[in-house]
Image (cartoon, rainbow, N blue to C red):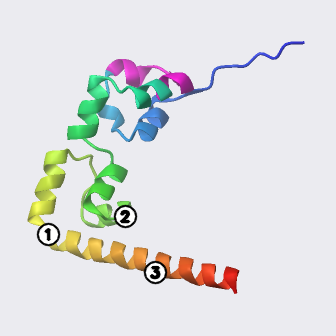
Amino acid sequence: MTSHQTTQTMKPATAAKKLGVYLEATPAEFQEGVISRAELNALQTDPPQWLQDLRRTGPHPRPVVAAKLGVSISGLARGGVTEALTTEQIDALKTENPEWLRRERATQADVRKEAARLKDKQRESDEG
């Protein structure tokens, strides 16, 4: 008896998320097909020009925008940013540095500090 291995595939939305790109900005053939694990690996290893361009200039999905601005996705929403942004728009926001962005960055810094404190506390209790 031989085992038959099926090719693992994913929807374009899943592949776009794994690649860190905004699905609506990808080429039509990417959006309309299914992507195999091998195709995804190939895109990650040797990205085509359209993928390089999307990663460089956007538009970027909200998780990428949040990371580039140093805030949470919820912080973006509280700041009124609900759409994908280009790298140029993100840079403009950084330059403008509106009140909501300063506030959300401070909140994010506090969250990181608290997470680090809890991790240290856990490590101490594990050692002790």
Q: Is residue 58 visible?
A: no
State whether residue 65 is above or below residue 104. above
Prevailing secondary structure class for the magenta stretch in the rendered image: helix
Residue type at numbered disc 3: Glu
Q: Position of residue 64 (x, y in %)?
A: 33, 50
* Mark closest to the chain's N terminus, 1 or 3: 1
- Distance in Å between CA atoms under marks 1 and 3: 25 Å
Q: Nearer the viewer, residue 104 or 5?
A: 5
- Distance in Å between CA atoms under marks 2 and 3: 18 Å
Q: Which residues are magenta?
A: 28-40
What residue sits 19% from the left and 44% below the top? 86
Q: Is residue 82 visible?
A: yes
* Left or right position of 8 against 15: right
Q: Position of residue 84 (x, y in %)?
A: 27, 46
What secondary structure is marked by label 3? helix
Residue of label 1: 98
Q: Residue 74's mark?
A: 2
* Left or right position of 57 against 31: left
Residue type at numbered disc 1: Pro
Residue type at numbered disc 2: Ser
Mark 1: give few (<14), some (14-19) or many (20+) Cα within 10 Å.
few
Residue of label 3: 114
What secondary structure is marked by label 1? loop
* Mark closest to the chain's N terminus, 1 or 2: 2
* Left or right position of 120 against 73: right
Mark 2: give few (<14), some (14-19) or many (20+) Cα within 10 Å.
some
- The quadrant the N terminus occupies is top right
What residue sits 41% from the left and 79% below the top? 113
Displayed quadrant of residue 17: top left
Residue 109: say if magenta.
Answer: no
Mark 1–mark 3 contact, CB under 8 Å? no
* Mark closest to the chain's N terminus, 2 or 3: 2
